[in-house]
Amino acid sequence: MEESNGEVKHLVLVKFKDGVSEEQIEEYIKQFANLVNLVPSMKAFRWGKDVSVDNLHQGFTHVFESTFESTQGVAEYTAHPDHVKFADAIMPQLEKAVLVDFKPTKVHL
């Protein structure tokens, strides 16, 4: 198995608090997606809602995936003022969140 060239995936799983409307959630998603235009180290952004039939989601409803060229890029993103402003706005709206950074690994068979 071989790690890709420094690339790092930044995954965030969240459950919004009861009372946060779908319109509010859509606005937060747009703001999150726009960070790719504001933070130079952020190379890509994708998101989705849980669709698993296994019912092991533990209440998490949304998944956000950002791509960075390195762990240093993630650190730059975390400290970037636009990310800090966004995080300060969204965190009070979340019941729970999990964040994981990983380097994708290719499996050679």
Image (cartoon, rainbow, N blue to C red):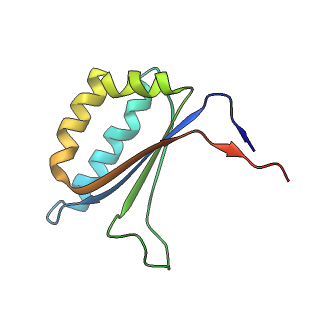
Residue 77 is drawn in which quadrant?
top left
Question: In this image, 60 relative to 85: left or right?
Answer: right
Q: Quadrant of residue 32?
A: top left
Image quadrant in which the N terminus is located: top right
- Residue at (32%, 22%) from the top-left corner? 80
Residue 38 seen anywhere in this rendered image of the structure: no
Total of numbered circles in the picture? Answer: 0
> With respect to residue 44, does 62 lie above or below?
below
Nearest the eye: 28 or 14 = 14
Q: Residue at x 24, y 37 (%)?
A: 87
Residue 101 seen by the camera:
yes
- Considering depth in this image, is 70 or 38 the residue closer to the camera? 70
Tell me where residue 12 appears, x and y as whole percent: 39, 48
* Residue 60 screen position, x and y as percent: 34, 64
Task: Indicate whether 24 appears above or below 73.
Answer: below
Residue 78 position within the rendered picture, expressed as x and y whole percent measured from the top left: 34, 28
Q: On the picture, is 67 further left or further right than 80?
A: right
Observer-nearest of 72 and 67: 72
Position of 1 with respect to 36 (left or right) is right
Check the picture and name the quadrant holding the C terminus: bottom right
Residue occupying image coordinates x 18% and y 61%: 17
Residue furthest out toward the front: 1
Name the one closer to the observer, 76 or 34: 76
* Residue at image location 44% in from the left, 30% down from the top: 36
* Vertical comparison of 65 with 40: above or below: below
